[in-house]
Image: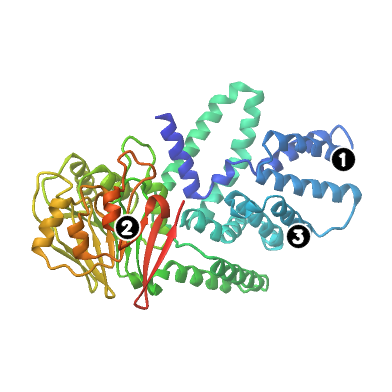
Amino acid sequence: MNDEIKENVASSYNKNGISHLFALSGMHVSLLTCIILFILTKIIKEKKAYLICSLFLVFYLFLTAFSKSIVRASFLFFFLTFKKIFKINLNIKKVYVVFTCLMLIINPYNVYNNAFLYSYIISFALISFGDIINNYKNYFLKIFITSLISFLVGIPVSINASFELNLISPFLNIFFVPVISIIIFPLTLLTAVLPFLDFITFFLMSLIEKISLFCSYINLFKVIMPYMNIKVILLYYLLLIITVYKIRRKNNKCLLIIIIFLIVHYNQNLFNSYTSLTFLDVQQGDSLLINYQSNKGSILIDTGGKVDSSFSYTKNTTIPYLKSLGIHQLNYLILTHGDFDHMGEAINLVNNFKVEKVIFNCGPYNDLEKELIKVLDKKKIKYYSCIKELNIDKNKLYFLQTKEYDNENDNSNVIYTELNGYRFMFMGDASITTEKEILDKYDLPDIDVLKVGHHGSRTSSSKEFIDEINPKYSIISVGKNNRFGHPNKEVLDNLENSKIYRTDIDGSIMFKIRNNKLQIETCSS
C-alpha cells in the first residue's frame, strides 16, 4: 500500500509539472553552494571559499553519479568561479553552448534523454532571457515568469515525453517553488543535524503531497497533444524566438502566435488525410486501432492483456500511442470476446482514457465482462452486445457472427469492413466452427487484410476458409516464444499465398489508406 501511495504522489508531481523540485537539480546545487559560501566567507577569503566550494561540488558529482542536471549546474558554478577568480570576461551563453555540445559529443544518446533535454534547454533559455525575468521586481511575479519561460521552452520535450500538457503548471509553481526551496529543502538539511525536527518535516511533506494529489485530480486544464516531429519542433522554436524578440520590444501580443500554433497542433487530426489501422504489439493478445481520416472517429478492437502480470499494456503502450496521434477519445471500444488476452486491459483503459461506448460479443457475460460492466455503469458509459452493424461517418462495420455458442472463442465478434475500396476482416478467436457458419451464411469477397483468428492457432484458419476469402495480407497477433506454439505450421501453410505479418517478428503493424493506396509500416520494439 505504501508503494502505491508513493507512486501516486510521484505521478502527481509529474502531472503538476513540479517534479523538478524533488529531483537532483540546479536548485539543490544553488542552495548547497549558497550555504557553504555563506559559512566560508565568514572565515576565509572569498576566492578560497569559492575554490573549496568547487572541490565540494566535485565530490558531490561523484555522490550523485554525475547526474545530468547536477553536471550542468556544477559547470555553471565552475564557470562563474573561474570568471570571478581570474576576472576574465567570457560570454556565458557561448561557453554554455560549447559545454552542451561537448556533453553531446561524449554521449550522443543524450539527445534522446528527456532529463538532459529539459535541464539543458530550459537552463539555456533562462540564461538567454534573464533580462526579461529581471525586469520584474516582485518575487512571486518573477517566479511566474521564470516558470512560464521554462514551460514554453520545455513544451516540445513535455509533449513527446507524455503527449500531455498541464496548462496550470506555471501557476502551481508560484506556490510550490518558494515552499519547497525556501522551507522544505532547508528544513530537511536542518533535520539531518537536529533530528527532533523530523515531525515538522514529515507534517509539511505530507501536506505538500496532499495538495499535489488534489491538484493532479483537476483535469480541466490537462490537454492531450499529439507527437511533434522535428519540423514542427523547429517551427515552434522559431516562433518562440520571434515572440521573445517582440516581447523585448514591449509587444506582448505576440504570445498569441504561440497560442495559435499550439491550438492548431492540438487539432491536427482535423487535417489528417488518411485512415489508419494499427495492429498493436501486445504480445500474446489482440489489439487493433482504427483511426478514420479528418478526425471522423476512432475505434479500438480489443485491448490485450497478460494474466498474472503487473505490466499494463494500456498504460505503457495503448494510451501513449492514442495520445501521440492526438486522439482525445475513443468512439467505440469493441471487445471480440471475454478472454483476458483480448479484454484484460479494458478496465484500465476506461479508467484512464475517455471511451464513449463499448460493444460486447454475443452470448452470456462471463466474470471478466461483468467486472467491466460494473465500471461502465459507474462511469455511465453505454454498452451493447450482439449487434449486427456499426456506422462510423460513411463507413460500416459488419458483425458477421451473431449466433450463440457454448464457448467464448466461437462467440467471438467477427468484423468485416470496407475502407476506400479495401476489404478488412478481423476474426478475434473464432474457430473453424464459426468460419464454416460464416461461409454458409455469407458470400464473402477476396479480403485485402485479414486479422488471423486465434493468434494462428490450428483451431482456426482452415484451408477451406482461407481459400475462400483469399487474403492478400494476413496479420498474426502473437507473443514471442509463446507457450502455445502459435502460430501453427499448418495455418502458415494455409496462408502461403498471403503476405504474412507477425507482431512477434514485425512489432506493431500499421496500414495507411492514403489517396486510395495502401501503405504498410512496421515498428518492432
- Residue 475: numbered disc: 2
Q: Determine which residue is flagged by label 1.
A: 46
**Type of amino acid at the residue the image marks with label 1:** Glu
Mark number displayed over residue 93: 3
Q: Kindly identify the amino acid type of the residue bearing the numbered disc 3.
A: Lys
Pick the quarter of the image with the N terminus: top left
Q: Is residue 38 above or below residue 400?
A: above
Q: Nearer the viewer, mark 2 or mark 3?
A: 2
Query: Along the line of sight, which residue is nearer the eye, 251 or 257?
Result: 257
Amino acid at circle 2: Ile
- Which marked residue is nearer to the observer: mark 3 or mark 1? 3
In the picture, measured across the screen, residue 75 lies left or right of residue 142, that is right
Residue 123 screen position, x and y as percent: 67, 54
Q: Earlier in the sequence, mark 3 or mark 1?
A: 1
Mark 2 vs 3: CB contact within 8 A: no
Viewer-proximal residue among 180 and 468: 468
Instruction: Tell which circle, 2 or 1, labels the residue nearer the N-terminal end.
Output: 1
Asked whether the viewer can see residue 311, the reply is yes
Closer mark to the observer between disc 2 and disc 1: 2
Q: Which residue: 45% across, 54% down?
A: 524
Question: Is 140 placed above or below 65 here?
Answer: below
Q: Residue at x 34, y 53 (%)?
A: 353
- The Cα atoms of the two marked residues, 2 and 3, are separated by 53 Å
